Image (cartoon, rainbow, N blue to C red):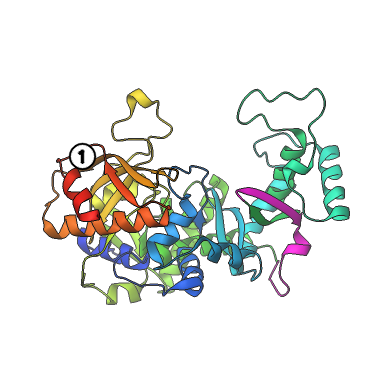
């Protein structure tokens, strides 16, 4: 089947619409809006960096007006609507997708390597303690007398065992206290009635394909299998052929690159922009995590530089892309100082194509005010900006 052509603008708006970034209140408000967002996005990545509120909270704050951290905690604990596991990285996932976490768990439980070598004796001891005592954290297990932590990933044996049991599916994360995981037996965490049948390769590939398309509007085969094992990607070719033949999806061409979409999504085009929305995207936002896709759809070169040595950073430690309407027009490097109750913008840089007019500055100042309040800050200090609009933003912020 010949691929129908789609323009960059159409592709961007379709992608942003499915991501809940094109118009206000796409998912609703409050806890219900939070759950709707997680279900639509299919996952929300977890990350440890905390110069501002952690990524999982920032991603949901971006999309759900009035988002509160308690919403996510309650959805995972008292309501069992969300669980924590691995997507392409550590993530919160909708509970109805639980069975699609099982293939990875099965592979790890039957010999596939994870980060560390398995220690069956330690794993049994840890599992027996949790079975007898109830939910436990890594801190509840003492390190051996001769244990010395030499580097960040030098975990004590019990913590390695906890993580291995979690990855294999024998344990689940019941909740987090602070940012520390609380582990319990899977059968004591999993709600009743959840399907726990193991999907086969074709069913898993179908899930990956349709989840990516539904979450992003259009997706390439590579994006569907992002950071997945090659053996899980191989089934995608056959599944994409079957879904196309059945008319469930359609190939579309953008700049000589083949994507796939739903026929109903094409019928929605052209999507009208309406009132422009401004968003400050997390580096791990679902819409920004695949850097090649950002370049193809938005002509935006982006690299997170927290892993780059400080002297080699071009823009900053934890730079947020600035989305204005359907274009990425800049980036800023924030740091929330809660003691000083001040949101510092270490660096702000606009793209050459950006038209820095009153509407953009007003929207950016308003969003920075929202970001400050979400991070417990009351003041704004822009340390560096190009072009030099720092004082103007500070004035509008007040």
Stretch of the chain drawn in magenta: 178-196
Q: Residues within 10 Å of mark 1 (few under 14, many from 20)?
A: some
Please give the name of the residue rendered at 11% of the width and 55% of the height, measured from the top-left corner: 357
Q: Is residue 352 left or right of residue 320?
A: left
Label 1, secondary structure: give it. strand
Q: Position of residue 134 (x, y in %)?
A: 82, 56
Between residue 37 and residue 198, name the one nearer to us. 37
Q: Position of residue 187 (x, y in %)?
A: 78, 63
Q: How many marks?
A: 1
Please give the name of the residue rendered at 16% of the width and 45% of the height, measured from the top-left corner: 389
Which residue position is annotated with label 1?
385
Can see residue 225? no
| 154 over 235 or under it: above or below | above
Q: Is residue 105 left or right of residue 57?
A: right
Residue 197 sits in quarter = bottom right
| 387 over 278 or under it: above or below | above
Quadrant of the image containing the C terminus: bottom left
The question of residue 348 being in magenta is answered with no
Q: Position of residue 162 (x, y in %)?
A: 74, 44
The question of residue 193 being in magenta is answered with yes
Q: Position of residue 345 (x, y in %)?
A: 30, 42
């Amino acid at each position: 089947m010949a691929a129908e052509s789609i323009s960059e603008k159409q592709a961007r708006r379709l992608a942003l619409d499915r991501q809940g970034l094109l118009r206000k209140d796409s998912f609703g408000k409050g806890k219900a809006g939070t759950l709707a967002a997680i279900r639509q996005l299919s996952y929300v990545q977890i990350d440890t960096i905390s110069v501002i509120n952690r990524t999982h909270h920032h991603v949901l704050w971006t999309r759900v007006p009035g988002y509160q951290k308690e919403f996510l905690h309650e959805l995972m604990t008292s309501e069992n609507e969300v669980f924590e596991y691995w997507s392409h990285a550590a993530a919160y996932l909708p509970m109805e997708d639980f069975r699609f976490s099982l293939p990875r768990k099965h592979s790890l439980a039957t010999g596939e390597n994870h980060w560390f070598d398995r220690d069956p004796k330690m794993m049994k001891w840890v599992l027996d303690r949790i079975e007898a005592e109830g939910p436990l954290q890594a801190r509840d297990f003492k390190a051996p007398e001769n244990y010395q932590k030499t580097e960040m990933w030098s975990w004590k044996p019990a913590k390695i065992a906890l993580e291995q049991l979690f990855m294999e599916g024998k344990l689940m994360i019941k909740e987090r206290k602070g940012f520390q995981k609380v582990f319990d037996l899977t059968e004591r965490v999993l709600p009743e009635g959840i399907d726990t049948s193991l999907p086969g390769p074709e069913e898993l590939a179908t899930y990956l394909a349709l989840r990516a398309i539904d979450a992003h509007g259009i997706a390439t085969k590579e994006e569907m299998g992002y950071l997945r094992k090659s053996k899980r990607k191989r089934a995608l070719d056959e599944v994409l052929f079957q879904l196309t033949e059945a008319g469930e999806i359609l190939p579309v061409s953008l700049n000589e690159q083949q994507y796939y979409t739903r026929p109903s999504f094409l019928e929605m085009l052209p999507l009208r922009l309406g009132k422009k929305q401004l968003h400050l995207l997390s580096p791990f936002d679902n819409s920004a995590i695949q850097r090649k896709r950002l370049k193809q759809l938005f002509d935006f070169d982006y690299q997170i530089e927290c892993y780059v040595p400080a002297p080699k950073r071009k823009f900053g430690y934890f730079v947020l892309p600035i989305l204005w309407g359907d274009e990425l027009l800049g980036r800023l490097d924030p740091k929330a100082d809660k003691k000083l109750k001040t949101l510092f913008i270490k660096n702000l840089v606009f793209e050459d194509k950006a038209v820095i007019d009153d509407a953009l500055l007003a929207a950016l100042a308003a969003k920075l005010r929202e970001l400050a309040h979400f991070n417990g800050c009351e003041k704004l200090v822009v340390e560096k900006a190009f072009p030099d609009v720092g004082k103007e933003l500070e004035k509008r912020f007040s």
